[in-house]
Amino acid sequence: MGQAVEDTTAETAVPRARGSRTGPVVAAARIGIPLAFLAFLAAAPLMFVDSFLRTLSTVFMYVILAQAWNIIGGYAGYASFGNVVFFGLGGYTVAVLMTELRWPFWPALPVAAVVGAVYAAVIGLPVLRLRGHYFAVATLGVAEGTREIIINLPKLTGGGSGETIPAVGSLATTSYPGNAGFFYMFLALAVIATAVVWRVSRSRFGYALRSIHQDEEAAAAAGLNTTRTKVRAFMVSGALTALAGGIYAFQQVTIYPDRLFSVEITVLMVVMAVIGGAGTVIGPVIGAIGLEFLSEYLRQNVLEYHTLIFGAIIVAVILFLPQGIVSFSRDAWRRRRISLLENARRYSL
Amino acid sequence: MQRFLQATAYGLLQGGLFAIVAVGFSLVWGVTNIVNLAHGALVIIGAYVAWQLHSALGLDPTLGMLPAAAILFASGYVIQRGLVNRVVNAPIWMTLLVTFGLELLLVNLLLVGYTGNYRRIRTGWASRALDIGGVRLPYGRLAGFGFAILLTVLLVLFITRTRTGLAIRAAGMDRGMARSMGVNIRHVYAVTFGIAAALAGAAGSIVGMTSTFSPADAGHFTLQSFVIAVLGGLGNMWGALAGGLLVGVVESLGAQYVSGTLINAFAFGLLVLVLAIRPSGLLGRPFYEARVET
């Protein structure tokens, strides 16, 4: 059961073959609009106040996280509920290298990506053998367990009371880049992450991941080394997430295990990818931008009820838009019909 | 030796409480294939119901357990019928997200209504203790442990000996077949969830009686239920009981002899290991061997 239904979501996520049924105008718009948008964003630090710039930085951080989750969760169909572990490890790698070994930021950041990828391979080999809930729960367990280990290494990581990166004064190894600096870092990495997903979506690797999503036995029978493919996807996801974590750690200066390994970060990246459209290139971007702005708006206007409303929104969106904004609007456009109620019945008992 | 005995006794008593929380979680997971991330929130709601009854009417939490369980059964039934049933067939991450959204909703409703302050139901007798050869056993914890074991046994009897229990097991084994035999799956799933919620509510009043609680504790109970349900095998009620006692004792001994929170790392490590090597749990075969769905 459930399998047949799941397949339809996977099917909607498969993009059309390159160049089919799209005219030159559409093609130009597809490239032109994002470029114009990027040019606009590149000028953002000149136009906006600092607080808004910080919000934008957070938005792009979540674009990175949602895209990274999208590779393993959206394309391969392995719903990782512990992706935050890479975020936390990336953050701690940068923090420990900069604080204990007095490295500058720039060499420390790539090390974070390597740590993320290696950790993904190490835990991926046993854990990616599991399916469904078991995989989700195992990754959650890995994230919680790793946090506890970090807390229990106080000499290296500062333990539960956190680690502070020397960011100003003579102790600083790299001068603090400020709001604009971090904005550009997150923006650049978000563009890279989206480009990676775009590249994956049209590559042989991407088709391998989709085939695993749809029917892993069939994929294996067709000669695909499913283990290697899954672990690779997990490594790419882990590396991207760790990079975001590394930048975040420097931005925050002082980091705590409870914040850097928070389950809520995992949930946010999953919700963003799913709301936008898991298994699509642009979906996680839309989801992250929409949800983070909404969250920020709620935080500023109804602080007390912020999380409460957020929970209600998550439930409502999953009920009425389970296939995500991108697939939903594509279907609605093709069939000239908007069918929210049909959606609500889709996965019903 | 004294320390060891005290820690073991305390762990066993605490483990009984964990078991009754986890047994409902495990039942829902085993039967409906839903991992209910809001389970811990239901426990805390139970604690607040008992607390409210105690402070408004002076009702002892051992009696407050009944209305708490009844209220949570009704809410659980409605939650499953109105919400979770609608995503039963969705990909796993969606069901996880729905229950997580529900958890956020419930916990924050509690925060708005009751603030985040730690509370405790103060009764005259619960904190007095029985002294056996220097080992202190508080009456509240003893009673809580007794109720936990009693309720688990009642649940097992209900599931194995009644018609409704039979329907629940059938629905867990093969939904399509149960349906074609005339089982109303929507209703049966809702009853299953309701039972789990009722047990959580009863557990909540024990929590309120034996220790302090606040809405922030919800996640802790959920995670513990995870570990116990996986250790014991999904839907395996005796497994959940044994797993709960085990986790209680290990945690208590760990807190006594190992530094800090390292024991949590060990628990999660064990969880991942068990999942990777023996997904059916430590205690033999899974309860629903003939399960058709994945």
Image (spheres, helix red, strand yellow):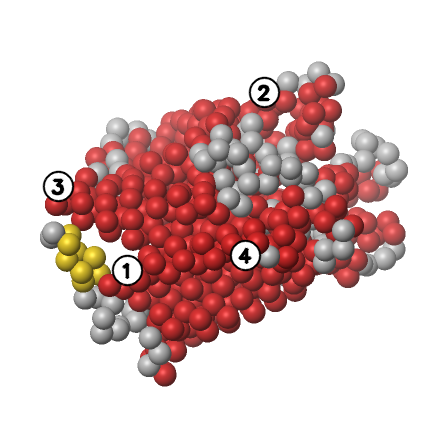
Q: Which residue is mark 3?
A: B1
Residue B158 is labelled as 4
Please name which of the two marks, 2 or 4, marks the residue nearer to the observer.
Answer: 4
Q: Which residue is mark 1?
A: B141
User: Judging from the image, what secondary structure is the residue with disc 3 in?
Assistant: loop
Amino acid at pointer 2: Arg
- A50 and A323: which one is in front? A323
- B35 and A330: which one is in front? B35
Does the rendering let one see residue B238?
Answer: yes
Chain to which the residue tagged by mark 1 belongs: B
CA gap, disc 4 to disc 1?
25 Å
Please name which of the two marks, 2 or 3, marks the residue nearer to the observer.
Answer: 3
Q: Of callouts 4 and 1, which one flags the residue occurring earlier in the amino acid sequence?
A: 1
CA gap, disc 2 to disc 3?
51 Å
Amino acid at pointer 3: Met
User: Can you say which quadrant of the picture contains the N terminus of chain A?
Assistant: top right
CA gap, disc 1 to disc 3?
22 Å
CA gap, disc 1 to disc 2?
51 Å
